Image: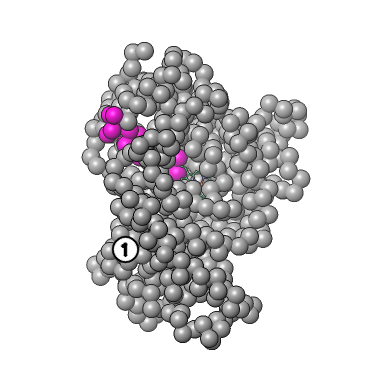
Amino acid sequence: MYTVIKHRRNSFILGDYIRLKYFSSSITDNGDSTSVNLGSKKTIKNFDDIPGPKSYPVIGTLYKYFPFIGDYNAETLDKNAWLNWRRYGGLVRESPGVKLLHVYDPDNIEAVFRQDDRHPARRSHLAMQHYRLSKPQVYNTGGLLSTNGPEWWRLRSTFQKNFTSPQSVKGHVEQTDQLMKEFIQFIKCKKNLHKEDFLPYLNRLNLEVIGMVAFNERFNSFMPDEQNSKSRTSKLIAAAFGSNSGIMKLDKGVLWKFFETPLYRNLAKSQEYLEKISMDILLRKIHFFEQETAENDKSLLGSFLQQPNLNLKDIIGMMVDILMAAIDTTAYSTSFLLYHIARNPECQKKLFEEIVTILPKKDCQLTAEMLAKAVYARSCVKESLRLNPVSVGVGRVAQKDMILQGYLIPKGTIIVTQNMVACRLPQYVREPLRFKPERWLRNTEEYENLHPFLSLPFGFGPRSCIARRLAEQNICITLIRLVREYEMKWVGEELDVRTHLINKPDKPIALCLKSRIL
Ligand code: HEM
Protein backbone atom coordinates (compact mmCIF):
# COMPACT_ATOMS: atom_id res chain seq x y z
CA MET A 1 0.00 0.00 0.00
CA TYR A 2 2.69 2.42 1.00
CA THR A 3 4.63 2.03 -2.24
CA VAL A 4 1.59 3.06 -4.27
CA ILE A 5 0.97 6.12 -2.13
CA LYS A 6 4.63 7.00 -2.19
CA HIS A 7 4.81 6.86 -5.96
CA ARG A 8 1.66 8.92 -6.36
CA ARG A 9 3.01 11.49 -3.94
CA ASN A 10 6.36 11.44 -5.70
CA SER A 11 4.81 12.26 -9.05
CA PHE A 12 3.13 15.23 -7.37
CA ILE A 13 6.24 16.33 -5.58
CA LEU A 14 8.53 15.68 -8.54
CA GLY A 15 7.34 18.87 -10.24
CA ASP A 16 8.34 20.79 -7.15
CA TYR A 17 11.69 19.12 -7.11
CA ILE A 18 12.35 20.02 -10.71
CA ARG A 19 11.22 23.56 -10.02
CA LEU A 20 13.38 23.62 -6.92
CA LYS A 21 16.40 22.49 -8.91
CA TYR A 22 15.64 24.80 -11.81
CA PHE A 23 14.89 27.83 -9.70
CA SER A 24 17.71 27.31 -7.30
CA SER A 25 19.99 28.13 -10.24
CA SER A 26 17.92 31.22 -11.01
CA ILE A 27 17.90 32.34 -7.37
CA THR A 28 20.86 34.61 -6.82
CA ASP A 29 22.37 35.42 -3.50
CA ASN A 30 23.20 39.13 -3.14
CA GLY A 31 24.79 39.01 0.26
CA ASP A 32 22.06 39.82 2.74
CA SER A 33 19.13 39.57 0.35
CA THR A 34 18.35 36.87 -2.12
CA SER A 35 16.39 37.60 -5.25
CA VAL A 36 14.45 35.45 -7.67
CA ASN A 37 14.71 35.77 -11.43
CA LEU A 38 11.66 37.72 -12.69
CA GLY A 39 10.86 35.19 -15.41
CA SER A 40 10.32 32.46 -12.86
CA LYS A 41 8.34 34.63 -10.42
CA LYS A 42 5.02 33.93 -12.18
CA THR A 43 4.83 30.36 -11.02
CA ILE A 44 6.14 30.93 -7.51
CA LYS A 45 3.68 31.82 -4.79
CA ASN A 46 4.58 34.04 -1.86
CA PHE A 47 5.38 32.76 1.60
CA ASP A 48 2.38 34.69 2.94
CA ASP A 49 0.08 32.70 0.61
CA ILE A 50 0.91 29.46 2.43
CA PRO A 51 -2.18 28.35 4.38
CA GLY A 52 -2.02 29.18 8.06
CA PRO A 53 -3.75 31.12 10.85
CA LYS A 54 -4.78 34.71 10.12
CA SER A 55 -1.93 37.09 10.77
CA TYR A 56 -2.40 40.61 12.23
CA PRO A 57 -0.04 43.59 12.15
CA VAL A 58 2.56 43.63 14.96
CA ILE A 59 1.41 40.46 16.75
CA GLY A 60 1.26 38.28 13.62
CA THR A 61 -0.18 34.92 14.70
CA LEU A 62 1.08 35.19 18.28
CA TYR A 63 -2.50 35.68 19.59
CA LYS A 64 -3.02 31.96 18.93
CA TYR A 65 -0.92 31.29 22.06
CA PHE A 66 -2.63 33.91 24.26
CA PRO A 67 -4.65 32.55 27.20
CA PHE A 68 -8.46 32.62 26.62
CA ILE A 69 -8.19 34.01 23.04
CA GLY A 70 -5.89 31.45 21.44
CA ASP A 71 -6.44 27.74 20.87
CA TYR A 72 -2.71 26.85 20.82
CA ASN A 73 -0.69 26.09 23.92
CA ALA A 74 3.10 26.30 24.17
CA GLU A 75 3.07 23.14 26.32
CA THR A 76 1.23 21.04 23.76
CA LEU A 77 3.17 21.58 20.55
CA ASP A 78 1.99 18.22 19.23
CA LYS A 79 -1.68 19.28 19.54
CA ASN A 80 -0.99 22.62 17.84
CA ALA A 81 0.67 20.67 15.05
CA TRP A 82 -2.41 18.41 14.70
CA LEU A 83 -4.73 21.40 14.56
CA ASN A 84 -2.54 23.02 11.90
CA TRP A 85 -2.43 19.84 9.83
CA ARG A 86 -6.20 19.36 9.95
CA ARG A 87 -6.99 23.00 9.20
CA TYR A 88 -4.35 23.88 6.64
CA GLY A 89 -2.71 20.73 5.26
CA GLY A 90 0.88 19.62 4.80
CA LEU A 91 2.59 23.00 4.67
CA VAL A 92 1.58 25.56 7.29
CA ARG A 93 2.73 29.14 7.85
CA GLU A 94 2.79 30.90 11.21
CA SER A 95 4.19 34.33 11.97
CA PRO A 96 4.63 34.76 15.73
CA GLY A 97 7.21 37.53 15.20
CA VAL A 98 9.34 35.41 12.84
CA LYS A 99 8.61 33.55 9.60
CA LEU A 100 7.78 30.02 10.72
CA LEU A 101 6.96 27.05 8.49
CA HIS A 102 5.68 23.62 9.51
CA VAL A 103 6.43 20.78 7.09
CA TYR A 104 4.62 17.42 7.36
CA ASP A 105 5.23 15.46 4.18
CA PRO A 106 8.38 13.28 4.36
CA ASP A 107 9.32 14.17 0.76
CA ASN A 108 9.22 17.84 1.70
CA ILE A 109 11.07 17.11 4.96
CA GLU A 110 13.78 15.47 2.87
CA ALA A 111 13.91 18.55 0.59
CA VAL A 112 14.39 20.76 3.67
CA PHE A 113 17.33 18.72 4.93
CA ARG A 114 18.88 18.43 1.48
CA GLN A 115 19.19 22.22 1.30
CA ASP A 116 21.17 22.31 4.58
CA ASP A 117 24.66 23.58 3.89
CA ARG A 118 27.87 22.67 5.71
CA HIS A 119 26.68 24.38 8.85
CA PRO A 120 23.00 23.54 9.38
CA ALA A 121 21.50 26.12 11.73
CA ARG A 122 18.84 25.99 14.46
CA ARG A 123 17.27 28.94 16.26
CA SER A 124 16.93 27.80 19.84
CA HIS A 125 18.38 28.18 23.35
CA LEU A 126 18.63 31.94 22.75
CA ALA A 127 18.38 32.98 26.41
CA MET A 128 20.87 30.30 27.40
CA GLN A 129 23.27 31.60 24.79
CA HIS A 130 22.76 35.13 26.15
CA TYR A 131 23.50 33.86 29.67
CA ARG A 132 26.69 32.07 28.65
CA LEU A 133 28.00 34.90 26.50
CA SER A 134 27.52 37.22 29.47
CA LYS A 135 30.04 35.07 31.38
CA PRO A 136 33.18 35.17 29.20
CA GLN A 137 35.25 34.17 32.23
CA VAL A 138 33.51 30.74 32.15
CA TYR A 139 32.41 30.13 28.54
CA ASN A 140 33.88 30.72 25.10
CA THR A 141 30.59 30.26 23.25
CA GLY A 142 26.88 29.59 23.80
CA GLY A 143 27.67 25.85 23.54
CA LEU A 144 26.87 23.25 20.92
CA LEU A 145 23.09 23.44 21.28
CA SER A 146 22.78 27.16 20.59
CA THR A 147 25.79 28.09 18.44
CA ASN A 148 25.52 28.31 14.64
CA GLY A 149 27.94 28.77 11.75
CA PRO A 150 31.69 28.00 11.64
CA GLU A 151 32.00 28.29 15.44
CA TRP A 152 29.42 25.49 15.81
CA TRP A 153 31.44 23.33 13.41
CA ARG A 154 34.68 24.01 15.34
CA LEU A 155 33.03 22.63 18.48
CA ARG A 156 31.08 19.84 16.82
CA SER A 157 33.96 18.44 14.74
CA THR A 158 36.22 18.34 17.78
CA PHE A 159 33.79 16.99 20.34
CA GLN A 160 32.05 14.43 18.18
CA LYS A 161 35.02 12.09 17.64
CA ASN A 162 34.47 9.94 20.69
CA PHE A 163 30.75 10.51 20.91
CA THR A 164 29.98 9.00 17.56
CA SER A 165 32.63 6.37 16.84
CA PRO A 166 30.91 2.94 17.08
CA GLN A 167 33.99 1.48 18.68
CA SER A 168 34.12 3.92 21.58
CA VAL A 169 30.34 3.71 22.13
CA LYS A 170 30.52 -0.09 22.31
CA GLY A 171 33.34 0.32 24.83
CA HIS A 172 30.74 1.54 27.36
CA VAL A 173 28.40 -1.49 27.21
CA GLU A 174 29.83 -3.43 30.12
CA GLN A 175 30.12 -0.40 32.39
CA THR A 176 26.51 0.56 31.64
CA ASP A 177 25.32 -2.99 32.24
CA GLN A 178 27.04 -2.94 35.62
CA LEU A 179 25.14 0.23 36.53
CA MET A 180 21.90 -1.40 35.37
CA LYS A 181 22.50 -4.25 37.81
CA GLU A 182 22.93 -1.70 40.61
CA PHE A 183 19.75 0.02 39.45
CA ILE A 184 17.81 -3.22 39.71
CA GLN A 185 19.06 -3.74 43.26
CA PHE A 186 17.98 -0.17 43.99
CA ILE A 187 14.42 -0.63 42.74
CA LYS A 188 14.15 -4.05 44.38
CA CYS A 189 14.28 -2.27 47.73
CA LYS A 190 11.19 -0.21 46.87
CA LYS A 191 8.14 -1.65 48.58
CA ASN A 192 5.21 -0.11 46.68
CA LEU A 193 6.82 0.52 43.34
CA HIS A 194 3.59 0.00 41.39
CA LYS A 195 2.06 2.95 43.22
CA GLU A 196 4.97 5.23 42.41
CA ASP A 197 6.03 7.10 39.30
CA PHE A 198 8.95 5.20 37.70
CA LEU A 199 10.25 8.31 35.87
CA PRO A 200 12.27 9.81 38.77
CA TYR A 201 14.09 6.47 39.07
CA LEU A 202 14.90 6.53 35.36
CA ASN A 203 16.25 10.06 35.79
CA ARG A 204 18.58 8.77 38.49
CA LEU A 205 19.68 5.87 36.31
CA ASN A 206 20.45 8.11 33.36
CA LEU A 207 22.34 10.60 35.49
CA GLU A 208 24.45 7.75 36.82
CA VAL A 209 25.10 6.34 33.33
CA ILE A 210 26.03 9.68 31.77
CA GLY A 211 28.21 10.51 34.79
CA MET A 212 30.21 7.35 34.22
CA VAL A 213 30.33 7.40 30.42
CA ALA A 214 30.93 11.11 29.98
CA PHE A 215 32.98 12.03 33.05
CA ASN A 216 34.10 8.78 34.68
CA GLU A 217 32.28 10.09 37.74
CA ARG A 218 30.00 8.23 40.11
CA PHE A 219 27.20 10.47 41.34
CA ASN A 220 25.93 7.69 43.65
CA SER A 221 22.34 8.43 42.68
CA PHE A 222 21.02 5.21 44.21
CA MET A 223 22.40 5.83 47.70
CA PRO A 224 19.80 6.40 50.47
CA ASP A 225 21.14 9.84 51.41
CA GLU A 226 20.89 11.00 47.79
CA GLN A 227 17.12 10.48 47.76
CA ASN A 228 16.25 13.73 49.53
CA SER A 229 15.57 16.87 47.52
CA LYS A 230 18.65 18.75 48.83
CA SER A 231 21.19 16.15 47.70
CA ARG A 232 23.65 16.76 44.87
CA THR A 233 21.94 14.32 42.49
CA SER A 234 18.42 15.66 43.22
CA LYS A 235 19.62 19.21 42.62
CA LEU A 236 21.42 18.16 39.42
CA ILE A 237 18.34 16.47 37.99
CA ALA A 238 16.22 19.50 38.93
CA ALA A 239 18.76 21.88 37.34
CA ALA A 240 18.77 19.91 34.08
CA PHE A 241 14.97 20.05 33.97
CA GLY A 242 14.99 23.72 35.06
CA SER A 243 17.30 24.55 32.15
CA ASN A 244 15.32 22.65 29.51
CA SER A 245 11.84 23.60 30.64
CA GLY A 246 12.35 27.38 30.43
CA ILE A 247 14.07 27.42 27.06
CA MET A 248 11.07 27.22 24.75
CA LYS A 249 9.13 29.95 26.54
CA LEU A 250 12.21 32.17 26.65
CA ASP A 251 12.85 31.57 22.92
CA LYS A 252 9.37 32.97 22.22
CA GLY A 253 9.85 36.11 24.35
CA VAL A 254 12.23 39.06 24.28
CA LEU A 255 11.83 40.77 27.67
CA TRP A 256 14.77 38.83 29.16
CA LYS A 257 17.05 40.73 26.75
CA PHE A 258 16.31 43.92 28.70
CA PHE A 259 15.96 42.75 32.30
CA GLU A 260 16.03 39.55 34.34
CA THR A 261 12.55 38.05 34.11
CA PRO A 262 11.67 35.33 36.68
CA LEU A 263 11.90 32.69 33.94
CA TYR A 264 15.36 33.91 32.90
CA ARG A 265 16.47 33.96 36.55
CA ASN A 266 15.35 30.37 36.91
CA LEU A 267 17.29 29.36 33.79
CA ALA A 268 20.38 31.20 35.05
CA LYS A 269 20.12 29.50 38.46
CA SER A 270 19.82 26.07 36.87
CA GLN A 271 22.74 26.74 34.52
CA GLU A 272 24.84 27.97 37.45
CA TYR A 273 24.32 24.71 39.30
CA LEU A 274 25.21 22.56 36.28
CA GLU A 275 28.22 24.80 35.76
CA LYS A 276 29.37 24.42 39.36
CA ILE A 277 29.15 20.62 39.23
CA SER A 278 30.95 20.56 35.86
CA MET A 279 33.75 22.74 37.19
CA ASP A 280 34.21 20.62 40.33
CA ILE A 281 34.50 17.50 38.20
CA LEU A 282 36.78 19.14 35.64
CA LEU A 283 39.22 20.47 38.24
CA ARG A 284 39.41 17.08 39.93
CA LYS A 285 40.02 15.32 36.60
CA ILE A 286 42.73 17.75 35.56
CA HIS A 287 44.46 17.10 38.83
CA PHE A 288 44.03 13.35 38.32
CA PHE A 289 45.36 13.50 34.77
CA GLU A 290 48.39 15.39 36.03
CA GLN A 291 49.08 12.72 38.65
CA GLU A 292 48.30 9.54 36.73
CA THR A 293 48.62 8.23 33.25
CA ALA A 294 44.87 8.01 32.72
CA GLU A 295 45.00 5.00 30.44
CA ASN A 296 41.97 3.35 31.99
CA ASP A 297 39.83 6.45 31.71
CA LYS A 298 37.60 5.84 28.66
CA SER A 299 35.31 8.74 29.45
CA LEU A 300 34.39 11.45 26.96
CA LEU A 301 35.93 14.03 29.28
CA GLY A 302 39.20 12.08 29.24
CA SER A 303 39.21 12.35 25.44
CA PHE A 304 38.25 16.05 25.50
CA LEU A 305 41.22 16.80 27.74
CA GLN A 306 43.55 15.33 25.16
CA GLN A 307 42.29 17.54 22.30
CA PRO A 308 44.87 20.28 21.65
CA ASN A 309 42.38 22.66 19.99
CA LEU A 310 39.95 22.74 22.94
CA ASN A 311 40.42 24.89 25.99
CA LEU A 312 38.82 24.51 29.39
CA LYS A 313 36.03 27.00 28.65
CA ASP A 314 34.95 24.94 25.62
CA ILE A 315 34.98 21.84 27.79
CA ILE A 316 32.88 23.42 30.56
CA GLY A 317 30.28 24.41 27.95
CA MET A 318 30.17 20.87 26.58
CA MET A 319 29.89 19.33 30.05
CA VAL A 320 26.90 21.54 30.85
CA ASP A 321 25.34 20.69 27.47
CA ILE A 322 25.79 16.98 28.22
CA LEU A 323 24.14 17.25 31.64
CA MET A 324 21.26 19.22 30.14
CA ALA A 325 20.75 17.03 27.10
CA ALA A 326 21.28 13.55 28.50
CA ILE A 327 19.07 13.01 31.53
CA ASP A 328 15.51 13.93 30.55
CA THR A 329 15.73 12.87 26.88
CA THR A 330 16.82 9.35 27.72
CA ALA A 331 14.55 8.99 30.75
CA TYR A 332 11.44 10.14 28.83
CA SER A 333 12.24 7.91 25.84
CA THR A 334 12.72 4.93 28.15
CA SER A 335 9.48 5.75 29.97
CA PHE A 336 7.46 5.67 26.74
CA LEU A 337 9.19 2.47 25.69
CA LEU A 338 8.33 0.72 28.98
CA TYR A 339 4.77 2.01 28.63
CA HIS A 340 4.41 0.36 25.21
CA ILE A 341 6.10 -2.87 26.30
CA ALA A 342 3.99 -3.12 29.45
CA ARG A 343 0.78 -2.64 27.43
CA ASN A 344 1.69 -5.15 24.72
CA PRO A 345 2.14 -8.59 26.30
CA GLU A 346 2.73 -10.28 22.93
CA CYS A 347 5.67 -8.00 22.16
CA GLN A 348 6.95 -8.43 25.70
CA LYS A 349 6.85 -12.21 25.31
CA LYS A 350 8.81 -12.12 22.03
CA LEU A 351 11.27 -9.71 23.58
CA PHE A 352 11.80 -11.91 26.61
CA GLU A 353 12.38 -14.94 24.37
CA GLU A 354 15.10 -13.04 22.51
CA ILE A 355 16.67 -11.75 25.74
CA VAL A 356 16.79 -15.17 27.36
CA THR A 357 18.78 -16.55 24.44
CA ILE A 358 21.24 -13.69 24.84
CA LEU A 359 21.35 -13.76 28.65
CA PRO A 360 20.44 -17.33 29.70
CA LYS A 361 21.19 -16.39 33.30
CA LYS A 362 20.33 -13.10 34.97
CA ASP A 363 23.82 -12.63 36.32
CA CYS A 364 25.58 -12.99 32.93
CA GLN A 365 27.57 -9.96 31.86
CA LEU A 366 26.11 -8.23 28.80
CA THR A 367 28.73 -7.53 26.13
CA ALA A 368 28.71 -5.50 22.90
CA GLU A 369 28.62 -8.76 20.90
CA MET A 370 25.52 -9.94 22.80
CA LEU A 371 23.86 -6.56 22.35
CA ALA A 372 24.38 -6.78 18.60
CA LYS A 373 22.10 -9.86 18.63
CA ALA A 374 19.22 -8.01 20.29
CA VAL A 375 17.44 -7.31 17.01
CA TYR A 376 13.88 -7.37 18.35
CA ALA A 377 14.84 -5.17 21.32
CA ARG A 378 16.26 -2.58 18.91
CA SER A 379 13.11 -2.62 16.79
CA CYS A 380 11.06 -2.02 19.99
CA VAL A 381 13.20 1.06 20.69
CA LYS A 382 12.73 2.32 17.12
CA GLU A 383 8.99 1.76 17.22
CA SER A 384 8.61 3.56 20.52
CA LEU A 385 10.65 6.51 19.22
CA ARG A 386 8.39 6.60 16.14
CA LEU A 387 5.28 6.93 18.28
CA ASN A 388 6.82 8.99 21.06
CA PRO A 389 9.86 10.94 19.95
CA VAL A 390 11.10 13.35 22.62
CA SER A 391 11.03 16.13 20.07
CA VAL A 392 7.92 16.87 17.93
CA GLY A 393 10.26 17.41 14.98
CA VAL A 394 13.48 19.09 13.99
CA GLY A 395 14.15 22.82 13.65
CA ARG A 396 16.22 24.44 10.93
CA VAL A 397 16.84 27.98 9.73
CA ALA A 398 16.62 28.17 5.91
CA GLN A 399 20.08 29.27 4.81
CA LYS A 400 19.01 30.24 1.32
CA ASP A 401 15.76 30.79 -0.54
CA MET A 402 14.06 27.56 -1.47
CA ILE A 403 10.83 26.46 -3.08
CA LEU A 404 8.48 23.97 -1.49
CA GLN A 405 5.21 22.99 -3.14
CA GLY A 406 5.44 26.05 -5.35
CA TYR A 407 5.93 28.52 -2.49
CA LEU A 408 9.01 30.62 -2.01
CA ILE A 409 10.49 29.97 1.42
CA PRO A 410 12.78 32.91 2.08
CA LYS A 411 16.23 32.60 3.59
CA GLY A 412 15.99 32.98 7.37
CA THR A 413 12.61 31.20 7.66
CA ILE A 414 12.42 28.93 10.68
CA ILE A 415 11.35 25.52 9.51
CA VAL A 416 9.97 22.84 11.82
CA THR A 417 9.65 19.34 10.40
CA GLN A 418 6.54 17.81 11.98
CA ASN A 419 7.73 14.20 12.17
CA MET A 420 5.68 13.21 15.20
CA VAL A 421 2.38 14.00 13.45
CA ALA A 422 3.55 12.51 10.13
CA CYS A 423 4.54 9.28 11.93
CA ARG A 424 0.92 8.93 13.10
CA LEU A 425 -0.71 9.39 9.69
CA PRO A 426 -2.11 6.36 7.83
CA GLN A 427 -0.84 7.61 4.46
CA TYR A 428 2.71 6.99 5.67
CA VAL A 429 2.41 4.10 8.15
CA ARG A 430 0.05 1.11 8.31
CA GLU A 431 -2.04 1.09 11.49
CA PRO A 432 0.00 4.08 12.66
CA LEU A 433 -1.17 4.15 16.26
CA ARG A 434 -0.34 0.51 16.92
CA PHE A 435 2.92 -0.37 18.64
CA LYS A 436 4.31 -2.88 16.16
CA PRO A 437 8.09 -3.40 16.34
CA GLU A 438 7.87 -5.96 13.52
CA ARG A 439 7.33 -3.15 11.02
CA TRP A 440 11.07 -2.42 11.36
CA LEU A 441 12.17 -6.04 10.89
CA ARG A 442 13.27 -6.94 7.38
CA ASN A 443 12.45 -10.50 6.32
CA THR A 444 9.14 -10.50 8.18
CA GLU A 445 5.68 -10.19 6.66
CA GLU A 446 4.93 -7.09 8.70
CA TYR A 447 8.04 -5.23 7.52
CA GLU A 448 7.24 -1.81 6.07
CA ASN A 449 9.53 0.15 3.86
CA LEU A 450 8.92 3.44 5.68
CA HIS A 451 10.09 6.70 4.19
CA PRO A 452 13.61 7.39 5.50
CA PHE A 453 12.64 10.96 6.47
CA LEU A 454 9.48 9.97 8.35
CA SER A 455 10.81 9.00 11.77
CA LEU A 456 13.80 11.16 12.76
CA PRO A 457 13.92 11.04 16.57
CA PHE A 458 17.56 12.13 16.60
CA GLY A 459 17.30 14.69 13.80
CA PHE A 460 19.25 14.43 10.58
CA GLY A 461 22.64 15.19 9.05
CA PRO A 462 25.73 16.79 10.54
CA ARG A 463 23.63 18.61 13.15
CA SER A 464 21.80 15.50 14.34
CA CYS A 465 22.08 14.34 17.96
CA ILE A 466 25.75 13.97 18.84
CA ALA A 467 24.95 11.14 21.25
CA ARG A 468 22.54 9.09 19.13
CA ARG A 469 24.47 5.81 19.30
CA LEU A 470 25.12 6.20 22.98
CA ALA A 471 21.49 7.01 23.79
CA GLU A 472 20.13 4.11 21.71
CA GLN A 473 22.60 1.77 23.38
CA ASN A 474 21.69 2.92 26.89
CA ILE A 475 17.94 2.60 26.24
CA CYS A 476 18.43 -0.86 24.77
CA ILE A 477 20.49 -2.06 27.75
CA THR A 478 17.88 -0.69 30.15
CA LEU A 479 15.11 -2.49 28.27
CA ILE A 480 17.01 -5.76 28.14
CA ARG A 481 17.90 -5.74 31.84
CA LEU A 482 14.40 -4.75 33.02
CA VAL A 483 12.61 -7.32 30.85
CA ARG A 484 15.17 -9.97 31.83
CA GLU A 485 14.37 -9.30 35.47
CA TYR A 486 10.65 -8.48 35.45
CA GLU A 487 7.37 -9.16 33.79
CA MET A 488 5.78 -5.73 33.37
CA LYS A 489 2.19 -4.63 33.42
CA TRP A 490 0.89 -1.14 32.85
CA VAL A 491 -1.33 -0.05 35.75
CA GLY A 492 -1.73 3.59 34.85
CA GLU A 493 -3.78 5.72 32.52
CA GLU A 494 -3.18 6.23 28.82
CA LEU A 495 -0.18 8.51 28.34
CA ASP A 496 -0.08 11.74 26.43
CA VAL A 497 2.69 14.35 26.25
CA ARG A 498 3.50 17.80 27.62
CA THR A 499 6.09 19.76 25.70
CA HIS A 500 8.81 21.25 27.90
CA LEU A 501 11.14 21.76 24.91
CA ILE A 502 11.05 17.97 24.84
CA ASN A 503 8.00 15.74 25.21
CA LYS A 504 7.48 14.58 28.77
CA PRO A 505 4.92 11.92 29.69
CA ASP A 506 1.92 13.81 31.07
CA LYS A 507 1.09 11.20 33.74
CA PRO A 508 3.05 8.97 36.11
CA ILE A 509 4.87 5.95 34.70
CA ALA A 510 2.82 3.34 36.53
CA LEU A 511 4.39 -0.09 36.19
CA CYS A 512 3.67 -3.27 38.06
CA LEU A 513 6.90 -5.29 38.05
CA LYS A 514 6.76 -9.01 38.81
CA SER A 515 10.14 -10.70 39.32
CA ARG A 516 10.90 -13.54 36.93
CA ILE A 517 12.11 -16.67 38.63
CA LEU A 518 14.63 -17.90 36.06
C1 HEM B 1 16.80 9.31 23.53
C2 HEM B 1 17.66 10.26 23.77
C3 HEM B 1 17.89 11.44 22.88
C4 HEM B 1 17.13 11.95 21.87
C5 HEM B 1 15.81 11.42 21.34
C6 HEM B 1 17.84 13.11 21.34
C7 HEM B 1 17.39 13.90 20.29
C8 HEM B 1 18.08 14.97 19.79
C9 HEM B 1 17.62 15.79 18.70
C10 HEM B 1 16.31 15.61 17.93
C11 HEM B 1 18.56 16.74 18.47
C12 HEM B 1 18.51 17.82 17.38
C13 HEM B 1 19.03 17.21 16.08
C14 HEM B 1 18.95 18.07 14.85
O1 HEM B 1 18.80 19.29 14.95
O2 HEM B 1 19.05 17.49 13.73
C15 HEM B 1 19.62 16.54 19.43
C16 HEM B 1 20.75 17.31 19.53
C17 HEM B 1 21.69 17.16 20.52
N1 HEM B 1 21.75 16.17 21.47
FE1 HEM B 1 20.44 14.66 21.68
N2 HEM B 1 18.98 13.28 22.07
C18 HEM B 1 19.06 12.28 23.00
C19 HEM B 1 20.08 12.08 23.92
C20 HEM B 1 21.20 12.85 24.05
C21 HEM B 1 22.26 12.61 24.98
C22 HEM B 1 22.37 11.39 25.90
C23 HEM B 1 23.16 13.65 24.83
C24 HEM B 1 24.47 13.89 25.53
C25 HEM B 1 25.20 12.99 26.10
C26 HEM B 1 22.66 14.50 23.78
C27 HEM B 1 23.27 15.65 23.34
C28 HEM B 1 22.83 16.41 22.27
C29 HEM B 1 23.54 17.60 21.81
C30 HEM B 1 24.79 18.22 22.44
C31 HEM B 1 22.83 18.07 20.70
C32 HEM B 1 23.16 19.29 19.84
C33 HEM B 1 23.97 18.82 18.63
C34 HEM B 1 24.37 19.94 17.68
O3 HEM B 1 23.67 20.94 17.64
O4 HEM B 1 25.39 19.76 17.01
N3 HEM B 1 21.46 13.99 23.33
N4 HEM B 1 19.30 15.45 20.23
Let me know if residue 53 is in the magenta part.
Answer: no
Q: Which residue is mark 1?
A: 85
The quarter of the rendered structure image containing the C terminus is: top left
Q: Is residue 12 above or below residue 27?
A: above
User: Does 432 sit left or right of 265 as displayed?
Assistant: left
Which one is nearer the viewer's eye here, 85 or 373?
373
Residue occupying the far bottom of the picture: 38
Q: Dividing the picture into quarters, in which one does residue 252 lie?
A: bottom left
Q: Which residues are magenta?
A: 329-346
Q: Position of residue 487 (x, y in %)?
A: 31, 23
> What residue appears at the point 49 percent right and 51 percent down from the top-left corner?
459
At numbered mark 1, what does the secondary structure look like: helix, strand or loop?
A: helix
Q: Is residue 327 above or below residue 11?
A: above
Mark 1, other Cα within 10 Å: few <14 / some 14–19 / many ≥20: many
Q: Residue at x 44, y 75 (%)?
A: 407
Residue ID at (54%, 37%): 470
Task: Please state the horizontal and vertical placement of residue 485, each as a whole percent of the image.
Answer: 38, 20
| Residue 335 counted in the magenta span | yes
Residue 514 lies in quadrant: top left
Look at label 1 and name its amino acid: Trp
Colour approach in the figure = one colour
**x then y, percent, for residue 167:** 63, 33
